Amino acid sequence: MPIETRDRGLDPRERQGRAPSTAQESPASAYQRVRATSTRYCKPLSTEDFVVQSMPDVSPTKWHLAHTSWFFETFILQKFLKGYRPFCPDYAVLFNSYYNAVGEQFPRPRRGLLSRPTVEEVLRYREYVDRHVLELLESCAGDSSAEMSSLLTLGLHHEQQHQELMLTDIKHVFSCNPLRPVYMERKAESSTAVASLGWTPRAGGLHSIGHDGNGFAYDNETPRHQVFVHPYRLATRLVTNGEYMAFVADDGYARPELWLSDGWAMRQTEEWSAPLYWERRDDRWWYMTLAGMREVDADAPVCHVSYFEADAFARWRGVRLPTEAEWETVAEAVPCEGNFADDEHFHPIPAFESQFQKRNQGATGGSPASDGWPPSSDSEIGSATISRIAQTFGDVWEWTGSPYVAYPGYRPAAGAVGEYNGKFMCQQYVLRGGSCATGRSHIRPTYRNFFPPQARWQFSGIRLAADPD
Amino acid sequence: MPIETRDRGLDPRERQGRAPSTAQESPASAYQRVRATSTRYCKPLSTEDFVVQSMPDVSPTKWHLAHTSWFFETFILQKFLKGYRPFCPDYAVLFNSYYNAVGEQFPRPRRGLLSRPTVEEVLRYREYVDRHVLELLESCAGDSSAEMSSLLTLGLHHEQQHQELMLTDIKHVFSCNPLRPVYMERKAESSTAVASLGWTPRAGGLHSIGHDGNGFAYDNETPRHQVFVHPYRLATRLVTNGEYMAFVADDGYARPELWLSDGWAMRQTEEWSAPLYWERRDDRWWYMTLAGMREVDADAPVCHVSYFEADAFARWRGVRLPTEAEWETVAEAVPCEGNFADDEHFHPIPAFESQFQKRNQGATGGSPASDGWPPSSDSEIGSATISRIAQTFGDVWEWTGSPYVAYPGYRPAAGAVGEYNGKFMCQQYVLRGGSCATGRSHIRPTYRNFFPPQARWQFSGIRLAADPD
Amino acid sequence: MPIETRDRGLDPRERQGRAPSTAQESPASAYQRVRATSTRYCKPLSTEDFVVQSMPDVSPTKWHLAHTSWFFETFILQKFLKGYRPFCPDYAVLFNSYYNAVGEQFPRPRRGLLSRPTVEEVLRYREYVDRHVLELLESCAGDSSAEMSSLLTLGLHHEQQHQELMLTDIKHVFSCNPLRPVYMERKAESSTAVASLGWTPRAGGLHSIGHDGNGFAYDNETPRHQVFVHPYRLATRLVTNGEYMAFVADDGYARPELWLSDGWAMRQTEEWSAPLYWERRDDRWWYMTLAGMREVDADAPVCHVSYFEADAFARWRGVRLPTEAEWETVAEAVPCEGNFADDEHFHPIPAFESQFQKRNQGATGGSPASDGWPPSSDSEIGSATISRIAQTFGDVWEWTGSPYVAYPGYRPAAGAVGEYNGKFMCQQYVLRGGSCATGRSHIRPTYRNFFPPQARWQFSGIRLAADPD
Amino acid sequence: MPIETRDRGLDPRERQGRAPSTAQESPASAYQRVRATSTRYCKPLSTEDFVVQSMPDVSPTKWHLAHTSWFFETFILQKFLKGYRPFCPDYAVLFNSYYNAVGEQFPRPRRGLLSRPTVEEVLRYREYVDRHVLELLESCAGDSSAEMSSLLTLGLHHEQQHQELMLTDIKHVFSCNPLRPVYMERKAESSTAVASLGWTPRAGGLHSIGHDGNGFAYDNETPRHQVFVHPYRLATRLVTNGEYMAFVADDGYARPELWLSDGWAMRQTEEWSAPLYWERRDDRWWYMTLAGMREVDADAPVCHVSYFEADAFARWRGVRLPTEAEWETVAEAVPCEGNFADDEHFHPIPAFESQFQKRNQGATGGSPASDGWPPSSDSEIGSATISRIAQTFGDVWEWTGSPYVAYPGYRPAAGAVGEYNGKFMCQQYVLRGGSCATGRSHIRPTYRNFFPPQARWQFSGIRLAADPD
């Protein structure tokens, strides 16, 4: 959608998401704003909720609060604040996640065994770190080194990632409890007709993807580089629960021919028969949400599916998942708007026809009468139709068919933070676009999230792609 | 030691442990006294400590508090209090431990995943149950049915068992935390020479063991029955840490010929090289205690050893563990005194020569110059020498060489509480005598505790026995 | 040994089983006879059958052949034959089962990975060992040392044990193969009415059990010692498949109240719903036998049940399993006859009324009209009724309710062969009486076999016992 | 295909490997030739060797022989030979590897439990299938359908894949046996100086990779498509054992910063400290080969390394692994020659300077004085230097840094054989070039082999790549 965007004078930095520290905002202010969000997310929790680790992938809330503080203490305060004394020497091991260069780590699967430090002590730790970071920022005034400034920004993005994990992790913790606690009551939604599924044709050719160096990005988004993309079609919205229920009803979980071999093995071992958090009650589907148990909303995007399920669903529909290059070249031309954590839905919401129309005024939408399958044989109309694409950002992370590998010429960041991304480039898949648990200022078109194909506890969903007719 | 005991006018009921509800004490008073102990044990804990389950054998403190209340609610209130409404219907599953006859159980290894109900809610649950039990007792006055009375007493003994588990479980939880939290600072001990090890010879013959029906006993202690005992010798005190360190230093953990086959396999899998909670620091042994990390006290009884270790140690010394009949026939003649939870040491203490002498005035002790090995060739002097036996009750549970099986003619208790003991009569070993975490009024000579041979997190130690020369 | 037995002139040696080496038979002859049985059992096998290990408990046939030879090589030839050179030095590790005192062992669960040595090489190994053993025996003439003589006898009994394992192991191997190979076609049986179940009352009192030192016995059968037995009743025959099918049909495998806690867990994990080798086909039960798949014979003794199943079955019938003392005091008075491996049925056979009558002429049998439940209230008539007891020896090993522990005063055999029995005295149960895969000359009334309670691949079955009315 | 290659008159068919069925060869002749190789590989084996499965990845030789026959029976005979009756109906399940569309499969990890059918029966099965296939081919004469013809060719390539697995699997089986059996004595090698490592610079740009449809290819090699390649350098030969020993000696297995996160976890769990089959003996490295235990040849290519090790080694050298596009564009211009199974070395051999010179006469080689690190700053001289590349085909499969994914526009083959490749496109990496266990006629530049990153039992090695200076 290059034309409209240009017309609207969309600032590229805006397009890539409001950085935690914007030009208008001082580092100290950005720091305080981002850090405050972590504690704000804890408001609905009781002390006991901070302690539990419901599976190795999940960390206790308390651990997230401490680890993000450890990050600033270790990479900023210990390095740049002269005479800084750590709050508690034992935390160096307890709250190191996986940085071998920094030292030993307390084993991840045992984080839930630590009742101490208490929540109160962890909050004191945060205050201690905050006080010293702000002191450091003040002492530097506007004169902080590029390295420190860059690490500070990294620390804030890191904190935002953990904020998302705090939400997905507590959802998992609560889901294991038959009492099904409510994290936050949910806002009512005014339901209207969901947008029908359309297909936007896209021309192929040499494209550039990856971050161009303006503003913050993780090392794994660089360097920007050329990639040859073949012509394709991209679905105009996310797959809905209703569409996914049809897959389930069509025995999708019982037909090995629809599944990758590893996915089928996983499905059998784990006895998957629906997305994570779904339960069958009296012939209807319910799911656990951060607002407690709800009946599944057929219009909302399907969520908490693994790559294996996303891939099987796509195969069932005779199509496929997009590559990350296919996704990114579209996303670059779309406003970085959507249903984010800032909206406090904490759940994906439907792409209603009304919103869709409003956003895409004048664009030729998919025929409302059609459900969009098979992909229609529209002539390729290129980027002019990108305006038809909804839900690109927010709602759910979109599984791509791209394994998470280094971009050509990739170099990990220098120092211990070089362990941030590169060492995970194996057996994981790229997800794009952020979710309803992602902070709006955290996301950008080049952002590469990654999870193993069996992961389901993130807000992960499906956008389809297809080859041209 | 029948004579002295009789001389001292020891009441048989006293000998068998002060029952939670004594003749002098009303049921309501006994109920309140026992229940209060559970909450008293929680005083040193922070809210977070109540949540953690450090291994499947361990339950969160919160769970113990709720489960013991569930026991009264399920077996007493629901049955005997007309119109009683459960505090929360979901608790029926959440806090059922293993009573299949009562219904479903929340899986034991997942108890640590439950942040809710909160500690506060659990305490409210306790108050709710307490209020109704007391109301029920008042309404019955002295006229409660035998069945209700018996179940109430069972419930109090059940609560006492969980009080002990609260202590052993929180010790394990704290031991998993590198911060090594302190449950309770420890009282200073005035150290003097530890008693040397002697051997009391015992004549064989037909003896009766098991509970005779006077006062409370678990079903597994019945019926009292005859058993033929062969002549034997029993060690006059528990094995000390110092003695056990000699076993460790003599490569006891590296010599398969000393171990049972299953024990050797366990030792290798679990990489045991010392008792649970022991750590090597700069050539000295330390251990985790409820008072935090301490250097190992060579004089105190060795503790937190498995049956496999106890058995290997005995084989190394050329002797063996006692059978439960050998143990019980001695214990019946000894005052039920010792280092119990009531003393709030929460750790085994040495059998000092001074105490020993005091207790055994006039008796011929083991020669202080000898360490007691090999068992001396004293002529068999029968029960007259029982006075030499120290540490029979309290300090540590003593592993016997007896597998936990039903006594001849055993019948499980009627109803759901029949699942209390009988169904565990397989692949476990009997331990006797109570520990420093056992309530004084909970123990008696016929008491049969039981754990699998690999269990180490209880206060379990070693008393040796030997065949006659 | 009760009087009536003596009256019938039963030779004690006969009663205790024909020892591999009888008075009439030279050691060399006994050696050749026993060794030949091992190779005779291999006749029906193809070369490939010798290689497979279908679970860690099972050993390849090839391994049994080599290990038994290794036993003679290690404990006899290396010690007593001057200048003996081992056939192949690597075999010292490869074919050592569990003797730590002798050296390293190739890991048991990996025995099936060894294609070499080939069957031919193993047979050459056997011939090499045989030649040297016979040479040694000849050189000693009748003048062999007591130690060598005793080890030779031990080696032959050891070989007989492995002969039984060869049969049970190949049965398991074949059962894993959908082709269901046949080991040996089965002899036809003339079916008549099965004997009804009766109960023999037995008086209690002080009895002696254990081996008295006359003839060969394993160390675990010693010393003979007194034990106090309570009055009881013993079932006159084994439980049949028909009776067990009634348990299955009555949801025996779905009712936790019938099971030990560990047994119930095992049942769920392993998804047991019938004895090992049973399969449901068109509403009928079939089982794998050494003669291939057969429809289950309702009259034959139930077989391939674990202790857990035997115990649950007994509980379902309101009775229990006998203790080993209860079993042995009866077995001492019964001729050591039955369906053994020598008969080459390799399957348990029914206790037909006709045989029963013949064997028990003049005795008062159980009423044919009654199925024997509940145990009848016959007056206690002591050992006079023992003649009513059928199937005491052979057919199936009978699970007792006795954990496998050391007898009072037990001392393991000296030297490396001391690892034979003692180190397994933990978490196993005693089985008595031998099976259809046991050599007739291998069994005796004092023989204590032992397996963990979950073991099912041996020919293990059920005889019931009950307390007096 | 670059110009210089054409200049040298290389026949394209030759370049892509001699297809099992060449133009000159009748289908029947090709069939007989390929099938005979499978049985020829079995010559050195004893019957017992055919049975063993040493890990789930490995299949018994017997199984390979039967499964490849099952492939022809199922996909050709059952479909095209009228009235064909399967040799044995049970084989449909026993020898189906993973084709869900065809029916049930006997569980892969249990293939080693099947002693039956015997080797002799399997060979009869092969003869039966061969007789019928040849009969079918004769009946069709030159008139077989395209579908049948294509399935026949697929079946022969499938058989060649299993021939390679027969070699790698028996190597693994033998390696588990302390006797270390020899599969085939090894030819002597005349050792001379190994070629020094050079770097060939390659220009970037749009290239086409994938199979163009001429001759046989697996579906996963299609469609041929454009890909944008960035400039890079490719190592002129494989990494040697000597170079790898330097990595080991430099603590390469103890430095987490060199490893992918999953790789490091695997290294720790599996306790890797050298490539598979390496053993330390008296300060020197030895390895298991198909010729038995040998001292490691420092000049031969390193082999039996996982992707994780290859990647860690590259990171240690400051470079990386090539992508499959980088590899293929070079391989297309190189003759498809090398050390293949046809040469019966069954082990990788060094790239000796002499051979290297011969092959590359007139080309400017890497300076023999330099070890090639860091990659030299030669000006980019493009494909003219490709002749410097040695060991592209044969010796060892070369790990690429490319996850195994579908090519753009990929469609699985129709029918059940569509399960051949596509369903494994997840969490595996592409390997290229064939190995010393690959048949020469089986390989081609577009050939995509794939294994999980932890796999080590294939002949897998390392070729390095680097970004331009």
Image (cartoon, coloured by chain):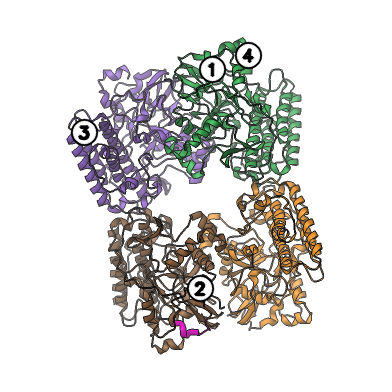
Chain colours: A orange, B green, C purple, D brown
Q: Which residue is mark 2?
A: D373
Q: Is residue D17 visible?
A: no
Protein chain holding label 3: C
Taking depth in this image into account, of C31 and C7 the one nearest to the observer is C31
Q: Marks 1 and 4: CB-CB under 8 Å?
A: no
Q: Which residue is mark 1?
A: B365
Protein chain holding label 4: B
Q: CA distance from mark 4 to mark 3?
A: 66 Å
Reply yes or no: does residue B230 show up in magenta: no
Q: Secondary structure at mark 4?
A: loop
Whether labels 1 and 2 belong to a single chain: the reply is: no
Q: CA distance from mark 2 to mark 4?
A: 89 Å
Q: Is residue C102 visible?
A: yes
- Crowd band around label 4 with a 10 angstrom C-alpha radius: few (<14), some (14–19), many (20+): some
Q: What stretch of residues is rendered in magenta?
A: D378-386
Protein chain holding label 1: B
- Crowd band around label 2 with a 10 angstrom C-alpha radius: few (<14), some (14–19), many (20+): few
Q: Secondary structure at mark 3?
A: helix
Taking depth in this image into account, of A335 and B468 the one nearest to the observer is B468
2 vs 3, front mark? 2
Amino acid type, residue under disc 4 in the picture: Leu
Whether labels 2 and 4 belong to a single chain: the reply is: no
Q: CA distance from mark 1 to mark 4?
A: 23 Å
Q: CA distance from mark 1 to mark 2?
A: 80 Å
Whether labels 2 and 3 belong to a single chain: the reply is: no
